[in-house]
Amino acid sequence: MLPNPATVESVAEAMNMAEIKGRSLWADARQRFLHNKAAVVSLIILALVGAFALFGGLLAQYENDFVDFTLIGSNAYKGVPSLETSHYFGTDNSGRDLFARTVQGTGISLMVGIVGALVAVVVGTLYGATAGYFGGRVDGVMMRIVDVLMSIPFMFVLILMLVIFGRSIFMLFLGIGLISWLDMARIARGQTLTIKNKEFVEVAHATGVHPVKIILRHIVPNLLGIVIVYATLLVPNMIIFESFISFLGLGVQEPATSLGALINEGSSTMQYGYYWQIAFPLFFFVVTIFAFFFVGDGLRDALDPKDR
Amino acid sequence: MFSFVARRLAVAIPTLLILIVVSFVLMYAAPGGPFNSERPLPPAVLANIEAKYGLDQPFWKQIVNYVASVVTQFDFGPSFQYKDRSVNDVIAQGFPVTLTYGFWSFVVAVTIGVSLGVAAAIKHNTWLDYLAVGISIGAQVLPNFVMAPILLLIFTLWLGWLPGGGWNGGQWPYLIMPVIALSTSYMASIARITRSSMLEVLNANFIRTARAKGLPMRRVIWKHAMKPAMLPVLSYLGPAFVGMITGSVIIDVFFSTGGIGQFFVNSAFNRDYSVIMGITILVGALTIFFNLVVDILYAWIDPKIRY
Amino acid sequence: MTLKNRLLATSAAILIAATGTVHANGHATHPLTGETLASDQTFTYRVGDESPSYDPGLVEDVDGADVVRDLFEGLMNQDAAGNLIPGVATGYTVSDDKLVYTFTLRDNAKWSNGDPVTAGDFVYAWRRAASPELASPYSWYIELMSIENASAVIAGDMDPSELGVTAIDDTTLEVRLSQPLPYFAQMVTHGTTFPVHQATVEAHGSDWMKPGNIVSNGAYVLTEFVPQERLVRERNPMYWNNDATILEKVVKLVVADENVALTRYLAGELDMTDVPAGQFPRLSTQYPNQAVSVPQACSYYYMFNLRDNAPAELQNPDVRKALSLAIDRDIIVDAVLAGGQKPAYTFTHWATAGFETPDIPMASMTQDARNAMAQELLAQAGYGSDNPLSIDLLYNTSEAHKSVALAVSQMWKQTLGVETTLSNQEWQTFLEARGTGDYAVARGGWCADYNEASTFLDLMQSESGYNDSKYLNPEVDALLAEAKTSNNPQPLYDRVEEFIAQDTPIIPIYHYAAVDMFAEDLKGWPTENFEQNWYSRNLYKVAE
């Protein structure tokens, strides 16, 4: 489900080694990333998908909630993709333009993925850095809490939360973010433990800089590489996660939609031959996730100078 | 080692208590009670039902009673939805089903995933490698709620080879599609992790030394490389196991297997407090247990780890 | 069937055909129609979810009631057309004041363990169903039957033994009512009134329904039960009319997803399943002898919240009427659902017994005329493009409800420029919101308790617990009260429907149809039964 902590940790080790080598780390990393063809192509694809989500609406000939009553329900088979009708991707089972809906669904899925990953990364990094920096009893208590939370079946709790408090995008972000910050916290703590013994931190400490400032100014920036890798690998998992929530019927409210919701609708009608209802959303879903995986792998390799 | 296990268990117990309290409070706060229906019940009828299930008592008393009966008697109380069954009945019936197909999915995912990953690593940058990577990413991105109906269409409707659902005591024809649908994405993850960690290990000095000594590749892989390469895989197994229990929701919906997932989702929607709590606690306990097992295995395999 | 078996069966069939005798097992003919029966008399059908209980005292849903009707038998049964026919009782007499019903029980009715079924079993079952101890969610049904002291027993103010039901002797059951109820006899076909075996219930407590423990008096006995997966019932040789039973085995499978169920039906694993919304036209062309649509006793409607705290704009009847007019029911029934449902302009289902659908002006207009009128009404009420109306529409999570809500919201938008915010909630949350008035417009569905118009129209009564709109109209209340005792209630019902059309507390949208796929070899389904009450012992499979 989540990016494997062990592989991310190896990046962290590499980062430490790179730290010693000097400041060419980021330049080196960019060089290495650009040499990874799959990653570069994926990055371009991601940019295209992003552009589709942002500006695709300008090409759509219909609003995403406009229902064409001649293409609804039992007549859905007439809603085939066609340039003449301007339904480029056809219509969905409720007679709505699938192009407009895919544009919107891609946007929502990307947003859920990115915001969810952001929540997880921000919370996890700050929590882990704090625990690692203070060490001792504070660290012990904070990390025990993480242990406790890790053994809670969060998917179940999230389902309960969505059922109980009603579904909303906010709830979804909150729930998804809350589930995935734990690994980040562990990794960030491990890194902080090594960073905090470095001279620049000790100097700051000795000159009486406030701990909050030390964490934010000196420790967190040094965690950046690993955070970026983790976040990139987290995004596709968030998107997959959201699709599962949509499958349960707990996703975003109509007429808003997400790729997961569109795929779910499409998969229930595919046996009737409305192949386009699943093909287009699934295509964007798969391409986006593929691209994120490759970019994440590329970043990891780039930030990890060890030859693979 | 012993103190490590003891410490982890000491954390486990408060964790379970927190889990019980949190889920109880969540359910209590939920709008809509377990006995709402399209026709609102007359007050007298509702009062009878609430008295029967002890819902007329104050909140603190309900929670204390509940925790006490769970802890002392291992009794999760009666189901609110299924009027003539207890939560223990529901779990006793659904859980073995989930565990059976979960276990087989786990075996399939690990066996195929590891084989695929090792093969890809050994034949690094050959067509086999690319094929393995392609298969594993493809399997990972196809959501299992898409895979399940596709499997049904192919194997049940078109080919007529497999029954389209049901459990029938877990006979193998009924197991195949659930196991495929549940295991693919984990198989893919395991393959990816195995491949990259095996590549790393194969580049390590001790392996190069072994190769230089003239040991055959097969022997190097089995004797030296396998153990360290499996460490990251091992740490993935905990989350994978939990994921499979969660994934049973989809399996139960599509293949009508009657496992714990179906009961959980239905109970959440029906506000069947007692069943939800029972399942949540059970899955929580299992998660803790499984993570513990993985940690112990990890410590056993990797002598560097000290607890 | 293995190949070898099939060959044997075929040669047996040839033999029979040659000799002209029809005695081989599995090649019998139906006693009435003379059709050749299939050798495998197993009926497998699909339900969407597990039922809460199959205990006659506790059963509360339709799928559960179907099972209870097979396992147990009450005083009276329904025939294929829904008419009353004898069950355990051979008949009944009514006192002149219509307050005392005396049922005569047949003396050959037996429990599956061989014990005779007596009037005492009914007394025990009815007291049990009403008792606070069992706390049945369906105990209100006993109250609805107007049995003497029912309310006091349910409230716990009287001992269950005070309930107005007495066993005069083993074959005579006397029931005393607190008020005359014209449809009382119809009500004893419902599972809540079926007998239970006292010794078994007392011996096993809440486990008495489990296979192995259960003792029942219906045409079938429960032999296997795996919750959320399957329930199997098999012929009960002790049933008094066992000779007439043809189906040997009935299997109920839980298949949550209706599309999956259809796949499995087409693969031959099910003999019966529901048709997903919108798929009926295609399936009935492809499988003309299998796709069946018959009227079902339910109405689908949208309700307005008329409470004081509700949105003010919906308190104007003209606005409500405009919203009603703008819904093109024909599109909803012909395209969205497409399963033989009928557009509704009255609340009462068109096929309800003894009910003649009144002429509501809206019903005979064209949709263009309706739209024009709607636009005019809304403009008069002060809403237009400069001051658009916006409303919240609440429905419970389901594909079919979503499709209807989407279509309706678009009709309002395209015709009237009304902005609709859709929100769907889980069933329990939805019921809570609707019951407490936390909505503006909400979806509703109502199914008949019995086959008479008042089962629908009583919802419009001010005091009704099911009047979630809180529509208060003394004239309607008076009409409904008068109808209770009237010999010819039809004109009164017409007036109530006119009030509904005029005040528009609800928007009737369509009248349900049961849309199912039936295997071609399955015969005897009571398609004429408006309440869809079916008995497996009347079904049979013919040889193909």
Image (spheres, rainbow, N blue to C red):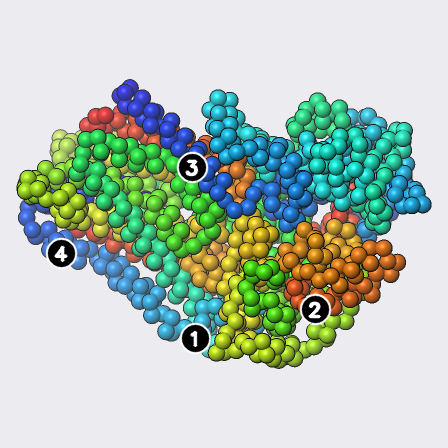
The CA span between labels 3 and 2 is: 49 Å
The CA span between labels 2 and 1 is: 38 Å
Q: Quadrant of the C terminus of chain A?
A: top left
Give the foreground label among 2 and 1. 2
Rendering coords of residue A175 (x, y %): 38, 47
**Residue A134, image quadrant:** top left
Front residue of C193 and A61: C193
Q: How many marks?
A: 4
The CA span between labels 3 and 4 is: 49 Å
Q: Secondary structure at mark 4?
A: helix
Residue placed under numbered mark 1 in the picture: A61
Residue placed under numbered mark 2 in the picture: C501
Residue at the location (25% across, 48% down)? A122
Rendering coords of residue C390 (x, y %): 51, 68
Q: Quadrant of the N terminus of chain A?
A: top left
Give the foreground label among 1 and 4. 1
Residue placed under numbered mark 3 in the picture: B22
Rendering coords of residue C462 (x, y %): 70, 57
Report whether A238 appears left or right of B42. left
Q: For the residues tagged 3 and 2, is the chain the same? A: no
Badge 3 vs badge 2, beta-carbon distance below 8 Å: no
Residue placed under numbered mark 4 in the picture: A31
Residue at the location (32% across, 44% down)? A180
The chain letter under disc 3 is B
Badge 3 vs badge 1, beta-carbon distance below 8 Å: no
The chain letter under disc 4 is A
The CA span between labels 4 and 2 is: 74 Å
